[in-house]
Amino acid sequence: MGRLIRIPGDVELPLIGCVAFGLIDRGTNLIQVRPISGCNLNCIYCSVDEGPESRSRISSFLVDLDYLIEWFKGLAAFKGSKGIEAHIDGAGEPMLYPWIRELIGALSDVDGVETVSMQSNGTLIRRGWIDELAELGLSRINLSVNALDEDLAKKLSGTPNYDLGKVLNVAEEIAESPVELLLAPVWIPGVNDDEIPKLIEFALKLRSKRKNKGKGRWPLMGIQKYEVHPYGRRVPKVRSPSWGLFYGRLRVWEAKYGLKLRLKPSDFEIVKMQSLPLRFSLGEKIQARLLSLGWMKGQALGAERGRTITVVGVPEGFIEGATVRARIIHNKHNIYVAKVLL
């Protein structure tokens, strides 16, 4: 995972602007909370090439708890402090965050937060933790499980010591707790086709164990489409399925199991809400102060106008604190990327 950069201990970077850490606002009541980057697995389909064997990552990021909550409170207040979901996710595994329990408790106490959810691969969740996390305010865990066949599960995780049995035990423990469970496998055509139906059957079995009987607030399954990303890992000889093929397969499984699988934002109580105004326009030329190594080779992080900017095309051995001319090439959802002008 390369060099660990503590924010703001090592460098005081704004927590809006970089996809690897901080907060992401996509114009809804859901705020993505990314306290840490990095992962303990090396999933062969990983869209961001994270994990101990990453070939592209040169840095990982760790955000101070108080600093993160301070920024989150400001964003929640901007959105009206009502109906907010704090979704703890990341480019990796959120359970690596050393203050994850404190984070859940602090987020649930923020004015306007009605839901605290988290994604996890389940490998770092210890027995007995789920009830504690529920008491702290955790509402739902999106658990990444891609196969019930042990050998295939290990292959997909890219990790020889991946313990599928432990992850399935975690799923059962969640199902028997006040925390709701959503199984979130990635469908990789030709690789785990036979495993998705098994996972659906597993989810239906777990539904009967729910502590709070009934339908639940959220779906049981959130099947994801395998995507090929420029900087991610690619499963050999597998292409990303078209959306038509993906939804067609979901319809087949829906008909067979009577379980809704084609999901919409409303299924998660996600509604549109004002988003932060953009600080930079596409094509805008800026003077960017380079304050830190970036997430990947050839990148640095700068800060301007209260936002973090990922600057690409940076020469190796750049001087931290130097200023470069760059052009904004990405600004969607206040995630900023700028390219150095030569």
Image (spheres, rainbow, N blue to C red):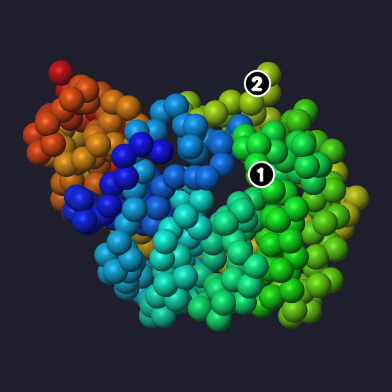
Q: Residue at x 68, y 23 (%)?
A: 238
Q: Is residue 275 above or below residue 215?
A: above
Q: Amino acid at mark 1?
A: Tyr
Q: Position of residue 253 (x, y in %)?
A: 84, 47
Mark 2 residue element = loop
Residue 192 pos. (x, y %): 77, 36
Q: How many marks?
A: 2
Task: Quarter of the image for the N terminus: give it.
Answer: top left
Q: Is residue 338 left or right of residue 219?
A: left
Where residue 106 appears, as percent x and y from the top left, is 40, 75
Residue occupying image coordinates x 62% and y 37%:
159
Judging by the rendered image, the residue that carries numbered circle 2 is 236
Q: Secondary structure at mark 1?
A: loop
- Image depth: mark 2 or mark 1 in front: 1
Question: Residue drawn at (36%, 43%), measured in percent from left and top?
Answer: 60
In the orientation shown, which residue stands out farthest toward the front? 161
Residue 284 lies in quadrant:
top left
Left or right of 46, for residue 211: right
Quick one: 122 or 278, which is closer to the camera?
122
Crowding at label 1, few (<14), some or many (≥20) Cα neighbours within 10 Å? Answer: some
Disc 2 residue crowd, few under 14, some 14–19, many 20+, Cα 10 Å: few
